Image: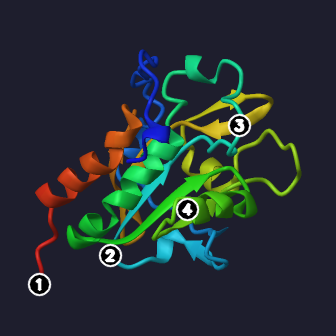
Amino acid sequence: MDARFALPEALPVPHDDGAADHLRVGPPVADLELPSTSGYHVNLARLDGRTVLFIYPRTGEPGKPVPANWDLIPGAHGCTPQTCSFRDLHADLRKAGAAHVFGLSTQTAEYQREVADRLHLPFAILSDREEEEGAERLGKFGQAMNLPWFEYGGKCLYKRMALVLKEGKVEQVFYPVFPPDRNAGDVLAWLKANAVQSQ
């Protein structure tokens, strides 16, 4: 991974606050279409096979400093390292049984497209955000799934996590995620240990 995206030392470690416990019982995936950086809409509930979905708060803007007190929020820092880890292991994740890989945040697809292009992502990022500019509510997918979130700068952002979805249901939950650059490796290890047997 690019040294520019190395994680700072002594970041606060997020602890399991129970905010994802309801997802561990395998609920159905919200039947909603989400805009993506690929220009088409994706309905995660209707995809065949296993889907890996990693969720993050927000990516920064090139040339701009880290927002004030961002590194003091447990688990907030590391969206680019997390994304790069899924990029670097994308082929391995697919080989291990992930039919689809997506990222998701509350940023607009237009904003996310810069990240997708700059990092040369082989997968799309999904946008889950309210239509009204400055809305403090979660996006429709986050509301329907009751995803863990926190507020920063008057906006609701998702806590970092990853889900494995299968045929419209949540199959596995990775929460909390730390350090973020190991998330893809943890998901890959789980996929290998829980391979779907061919019929």
Q: Quadrant of residue 94?
A: bottom left
**Three-letter amino acid code of the residue under disc 4:** Ala
Q: For this rendering, which residue is in front, 187 or 22? A: 187
Give the Cα distance between marks 1 and 4: 28 Å
Residue 127: name its quadrant. bottom right
Q: Which amino acid lies under the numbered mark 3 shown in the image of this protein?
A: Cys
Residue beneath disc 4: 30
Could you say whether the residue bearing mark 1 is in a helix, strand or loop? loop
The answer to the question of whether label 1 and label 2 lie on touching residues, with beta carbons closer than 8 A, is: no
Report how far apart the C-alphas of labels 2 and 3 lie in the structure.
Answer: 31 Å
- Residue 141 drawn at (x, y percent): 62, 56
- Local crowd size for mark 4, using a 10 Å CA cut-off: few (<14), some (14–19), many (≥20): some
- Decide if residue 50 is on the left or right side of residue 139: left
Residue at image coords 40%, 33%: 176
Q: Earlier in the sequence, mark 2 or mark 3?
A: 2
- C-alpha distance separating marks 3 and 4: 19 Å
Q: For numbered disc 4, what is the local secondary structure?
A: loop
**Residue that carries the numbered disc 2 in the rendered image:** 49
Q: Amino acid at mark 2?
A: Gly
Residue 199 image label: 1
Using residue 120 as the reference point, say whether residue 117 is left or right of it: right
Q: Which residue is mark 3?
A: 156
